[in-house]
Amino acid sequence: AQSVTQLDSQVPVFEEAPVELRCNYSSSVSVYLFWYVQYPNQGLQLLLKYLSGSTLVKGINGFEAEFNKSQTSFHLRKPSVHISDTAEYFCAFYYNQGGKLIFGQGTELSVKP
Amino acid sequence: GAVVSQHPSWVICKSGTSVKIECRSLDFQATTMFWYRQFPKQSLMLMATSNEGSKATYEQGVEKDKFLINHASLTLSTLTVTSAHPEDSSFYICSAGTMGEQYFGPGTRLTVT
């Protein structure tokens, strides 16, 4: 079965510290991978995506993610977080046969001063 | 970038009444739109896939007679919650796009009293 697991439901971190939000997926077919951010009472905004090519993907707001096929992971990183990065982050994948996005459970990033 | 709007952003209705939520793609045509439901502190749950000019495809467990979806044009899909009950209170989000790269609306907060 196709699934996405975000290993941490909550990640508290101090401002200017580095952060990694972990995401693993399970799929028997090729997938496209995404990270979305959701601020309170808002829809989702695309942070970055992996479709093919370089496994290191850079996104908006200084975030980047690395696709690791052997470990079926797509972890999100930022070297120095800001208070404004406090939000819910969702990892997701898409596969052609399914025709829809499969979302992880979400990780709440809380950046403290 | 592509923009998806939703209207209304917030609605309160009485139990037993129906409410319609609109989802519009503002600067692109969307053959397919998706409707999600999100409970507090949870991930997005796909309710249905809306296809322009044809019937929507509902996910397992979603009552098609209760959640009516109409995709009448390439820029508009509507979700009507019929005979709403308090348990239908939730955050409803639509999206549009291709190949998994979805653009999300800002969401509609429905409260049924």
Image (cartoon, grey):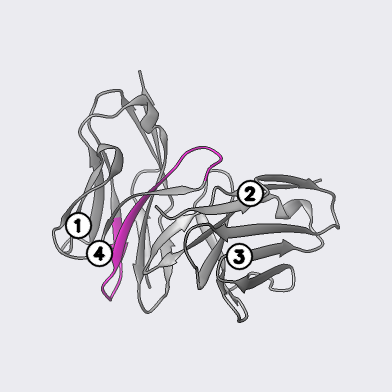
The answer to which of B110 and A60 lies nearer the viewer is: A60
Q: Disc 1 marks which residue?
A: A67
In the image, the segment drawn in magenta is A24-42
Q: CA distance from mark 1 to mark 2?
A: 33 Å
Residue drawn 73% across and 46% down?
A: B11
Secondary structure found at label 3: strand
Residue at the top extreme of this rendering: A113
Residue drawn 20% across and 33% down?
A: A79
Q: CA distance from mark 1 to mark 4?
A: 10 Å
Amino acid type, callout 4: Leu
Mark drawn on residue B108: 2
Q: Disc 4 marks which residue?
A: A51
Q: Of the residues tagged 2 and 3, which is closer to the observer?
A: 3
Labels 4 and 3 within one chain: no
Based on the picture, tell me whether residue A28 belongs to the magenta stretch. yes
Q: Position of residue A87 (x, y in %)?
A: 43, 37
Q: Disc 3 marks which residue?
A: B76
Q: CA distance from mark 4 to mark 2?
A: 30 Å
Q: Position of residue B25 (x, y in %)?
A: 53, 60
Q: How many marks?
A: 4
Amino acid type, callout 1: Phe
- Asked if residue A21 is positioned above or below residue A29 in the image, the reply reads above
Residue drawn 47% across and 63% down?
A: B28
Based on the picture, tell me whether residue B83 belongs to the magenta stretch. no
Q: Of the residues tagged 4 and 3, which is closer to the observer?
A: 3
Amino acid type, callout 3: Leu
Q: Is residue B41 left or right of residue A29?
A: right
Tags 4 and 2 touching, CB below 8 Å? no
Q: In terms of image quadrants, where is residue B69?
A: bottom right
Number of residues whose C-alpha sits closer than 10 Å to that of mark 2, classed few (under 14), some (14–19) or many (20 or more): many
Disc 4 chain ID = A
Disc 2 chain ID = B
